[in-house]
Image (spheres, helix red, strand yellow):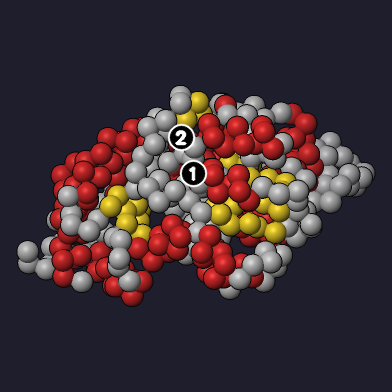
């Protein structure tokens, strides 16, 4: 190879937008009320998002981290409780629990799907466990059959971290049809975005009402006398963001279809590269929105991986190093940390340890490219790994 293979054409940009978003912003502007209590965009978005995901009640919030925090609070998570989280995930999964004074208990993930290992979850459930938080990594849904059974047997509720799973399905069921709380993110890189934003799907009206009051400073929707019912914060989404998200939601299914068509091609090509092991798919997850195209390079050092990622970016491939195990960050130990050392957690989470150093991910806009571009991307990955 030339050791200088590059993309011959630019991949699609992200975010994607058009007249739909422009018209939506003008619609929100001209209604004359720019916050959710007086406007109609947030209410409309919540109804549309819930319907699209098979949920009973959606509550739009300021961002995905707040969505997790609010959902955990509604489930009764607080000081003195524990929340089981995957060790391999973005830090919000653990920080949302820790911000409430709870201890985040990291457990290992499956080395092939990168999703939380149900057997590790079962071993970690204790008397203080108040919630189990599976993260649908890169759009691959966790083993919801096993997790639902664990939840039913233990009485510990699930909260799906669905920040990567807009439009995902498990055995034909959408995220909101699985009977548990689910939290989504609309941050700039997500599968649908308004720059920031989030949502919580609640399975019943009572939980939704608790969430609404808490996300609005503890104040009921109809309150005019400042009778704040409970503690809370201001997690309300604004009307402009909601208007954009309505347009983004309308694009989602077609984009997922394109990514579902492209991933098998890219997956096959990546798997043919010596030393590359793409993320596996559990076929029970029969609709995967592919938030990231992830693969491992077992045995690579963190230093060499960083060099590989830099070279991919230089050659036009939007690549990133994967998440660091949450207990490998200074932030994890600042508040409500478990009574274990880093080394003890590392021994319990060997697969998360490996992923911390050997996993690379490509932005989902790669999978919005043409089939020919999948060949170009794989050729660049192969060339970079050969020469790094």
Q: Taking the image as drawn, is residue 324 in sight?
A: yes
Closer mark to the observer between disc 1 and disc 2: 1
Q: Which residue is mark 2?
A: 168
Task: Give the label on residue 136, or none.
Answer: 1
Helix, strand or loop at label 2? It is: loop
Q: Nearer the viewer, residue 296 or 138?
A: 296
Q: Residue at x 40, y 60 (%)?
A: 355
| Residue contact at pointers 1 and 2, CB within 8 angstroms | yes
Q: Position of residue 316 (x, y in %)?
A: 24, 61
Q: CA distance from mark 1 to mark 2?
A: 9 Å
> Left of 10 or right of it: where is 41?
right
Query: Crowding near pointer 2: few (<14 within 10 Å), some, many (20+)?
Result: many
Q: Nearer the viewer, residue 330 or 130?
A: 130
Q: Position of residue 116 (x, y in %)?
A: 51, 47
Q: Residue at x 46, y 60 (%)?
A: 350
Q: Taking the image as drawn, is residue 24 in sight?
A: no
Query: Crowding near pointer 1: few (<14 within 10 Å), some, many (20+)?
Result: many
First in residue order: circle 1 vs circle 2: 1
> Left of 289 or right of it: where is 131?
right
* Residue reaching furthest to the top: 172
Q: Residue at x 75, y 60 (%)?
A: 101
> Left of 278 or right of it: where is 215?
right
Q: Position of residue 64 (x, y in %)?
A: 58, 50
Q: Residue at x 44, y 48 (%)?
A: 110
Q: Is residue 12 above or below residue 158?
A: below
Q: Is residue 380 above or below residue 264?
A: below
Q: Is residue 167 above or below residue 17?
A: above
Q: Nearer the viewer, residue 114 or 175?
A: 114
Q: Position of residue 377 (x, y in %)?
A: 20, 53
Task: Give the label on residue 89, or none.
Answer: none
């Amino acid at each position: 190879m030339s050791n200088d293979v590059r993309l011959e054409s630019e991949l699609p940009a992200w975010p994607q937008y058009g007249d739909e978003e422009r018209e939506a912003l003008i619609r929100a502007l001209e209604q004359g009320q720019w916050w959710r209590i007086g406007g109609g965009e947030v209410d409309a978005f919540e109804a549309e998002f819930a319907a699209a995901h098979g949920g009973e009640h959606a509550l739009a919030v300021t961002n995905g981290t707040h969505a997790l925090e609010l959902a955990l609070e509604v489930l009764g998570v607080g000081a003195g409780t524990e929340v089981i989280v995957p060790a391999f995930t973005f830090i919000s999964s653990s920080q949302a629990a820790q911000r409430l004074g709870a201890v985040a208990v990291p457990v290992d993930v499956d080395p092939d799907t990168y999703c939380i290992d149900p057997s590790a979850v079962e071993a970690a459930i204790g008397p203080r466990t108040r919630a189990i938080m599976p993260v649908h990594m890169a759009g691959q849904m966790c083993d919801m059959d096993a997790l639902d059974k664990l939840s039913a047997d233990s009485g510990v509720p699930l909260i799906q971290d669905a920040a990567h799973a807009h439009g995902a399905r498990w055995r034909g069921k959408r995220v909101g049809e699985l009977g548990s709380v689910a939290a989504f993110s609309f941050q700039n890189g997500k599968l649908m975005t308004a720059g920031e934003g989030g949502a919580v799907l609640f399975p019943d009206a009572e939980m939704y009402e608790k969430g609404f009051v808490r996300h609005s400073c503890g104040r009921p929707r109809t309150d005019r006398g400042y009778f704040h019912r409970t503690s809370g914060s201001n997690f309300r989404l604004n009307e402009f963001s909601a208007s954009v998200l309505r347009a983004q939601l309308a694009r989602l299914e077609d984009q997922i279809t394109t990514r579902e068509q492209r991933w098998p091609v890219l997956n096959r090509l990546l798997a043919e590269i010596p030393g590359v092991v793409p993320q596996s798919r559990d076929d029970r997850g029969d609709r995967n929105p592919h938030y990231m195209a992830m693969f491992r390079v077992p045995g690579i050092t963190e230093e060499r991986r960083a060099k590989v990622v830099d070279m991919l970016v230089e050659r036009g491939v939007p690549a990133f190093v994967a998440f660091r195990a949450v207990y490998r960050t200074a932030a994890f130990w600042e508040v409500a940390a478990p009574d274990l050392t880093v080394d003890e957690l590392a021994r319990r989470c060997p697969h998360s340890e490996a992923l911390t150093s050997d996993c690379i991910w490509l932005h989902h806009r790669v999978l919005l490219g043409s089939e020919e571009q999948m060949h170009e991307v794989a050729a660049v990955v192969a060339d970079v790994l050969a020469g790094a």
